[in-house]
Image (tube, helix red, strand yellow):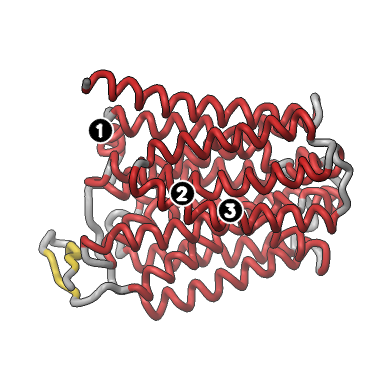
Amino acid sequence: MLDHIPSPGGDARTIEHARWGAVVSMTLGVFGLVTAEFLPVSLLTPISSDLNVTSGLAGQSITMTAIVAAIAGPAVIIGTRKFDRRWTVLALTMTLIISSLIAAAANSIHMLLAARFLLGIGLGGFWAMSAALAMRLVPPHLMPRAMAIIMAGVSLATVCAAPLGAWIGATMGWRAAFGLSAGIGGVALLVQAFTLPALPPSGHAGLATMAALLRRPAMRLGLVTILLVITGHFAGFTYIRPFLERVPHLGVETISLILLAYGVAGFFGNLLGGFVSERSPRLSITIFASLIAAAAVSMAVAGSSEIVAATAVAIWGLAFGAIPVSLQSFVVRAGSDEAESAGALMLTTFQIAISSGAVLGGILIETQGPIAVVTFLAAGALLGASVMASRGQQRRLSMG
């Protein structure tokens, strides 16, 4: 099997086999970074109590990371375009370790936000280039498999961070959860150091390339859908623990179990989303965004029931587990010729949506209560599904 990696001078050099170890090391890195990003979701109550701030203010630790990552994604791609990607990846993984250690030692909200700022730099740069680098580590016919492995790290992190954080927070304290994320970063750094080959710069990453990608209708459709669905999701998901505490009045042990069910369901949702996306990413996004909306409506209407709340959260986890891989498949198809720039655009849009969701969710939960948060989730997911479905219908009609 052959793979071609461009050299600094533009010539191609050949490797004789797929570097699956390096692909796995990238998966470990993105898993650690995204896990650290979402750890506060299940730790808002103890963090806010320990640092003497409101849950809404503590939730902005997620907003901080998302805002910085949105800027850092394209900035790192463009700013390091002349550097060997191996050293860039190792540096970005180091930010995970350092930021997690600072967060674990934080004695004020300002120190925690500083740690989350640093995490945003690592997250933005790493996630933006991870899929593009995976394409360079395997032969072309194995590229979809490598991308699926990378996205599995993202999907698993988004669905595992909350239950993992809740369990560790309840048994060892919230600071121990950030200590664990530093340990994950250490393992990822070690594996990357031993498996990543030299990866000289390639492509034409730049603002002009990103602007050209934005002129493609399919790319714009994918990014708009990300804004709608992900904003709604994180408005609800950031404050899922306060919802479960205030509406069905659940204790921390039960909440941990429900979040675990969310994570397990999300893992299977990731597999299901990959299966459906192989046939049609558009269909996959429409189906699973609609399922998120249905789960949110049931929480808003009958969430005071423990059974309804638990079932709805599990369905939500299943549906959202399918969303990242479905969106990645859609966006990559729209910009496969400039993968790093497409990845940067997706990362920036994702992080804008995450930060917007956390801010809006914080405003809603402080002013209107938790029911308003899940209602907003339902509206965002339903709008995203409708946009994707209606554009698909328009395309079929125009072709007919």
Mark 1, residues whose alpha carbon is within 10 Å: few (<14), some, or many (≥20)? few
Image quadrant where one finds the C terminus = top left
Q: Is residue 168 left or right of residue 323?
A: right
Question: Disc 3 on helix, strand or loop?
Answer: helix
Image quadrant where one finds the N terminus = bottom left
> x%, y% of residue 360?
67, 30
Relative depth, front residue between 288 and 143 = 288
Q: Is residue 41 above or below residue 367?
A: below
What distance separates the C-alpha of mark 3 from that of mark 2? 10 Å
Q: Is residue 33 above or below residue 20?
A: above
Residue that numbered label 2 is attached to: 273
Question: Disc 2 on helix, strand or loop?
Answer: helix
> x%, y% of residue 287?
49, 37
Q: Is residue 118 visible?
A: no
Mark 3, residues whose alpha carbon is within 10 Å: few (<14), some, or many (≥20)? many
Q: State which quadrant residue 280 falls in.
A: top left
Residue that numbered label 1 is attached to: 212
**What amino acid is at disc 3?**
Gly
Q: Is residue 251 left or right of residue 179?
A: right
**What amino acid is at disc 1?**
Ala
Q: State which quadrant residue 175 falls in.
A: bottom right
Q: Residue at x 48, y 73 (%)?
A: 189
Q: Residue at x 45, y 38 (%)?
A: 285
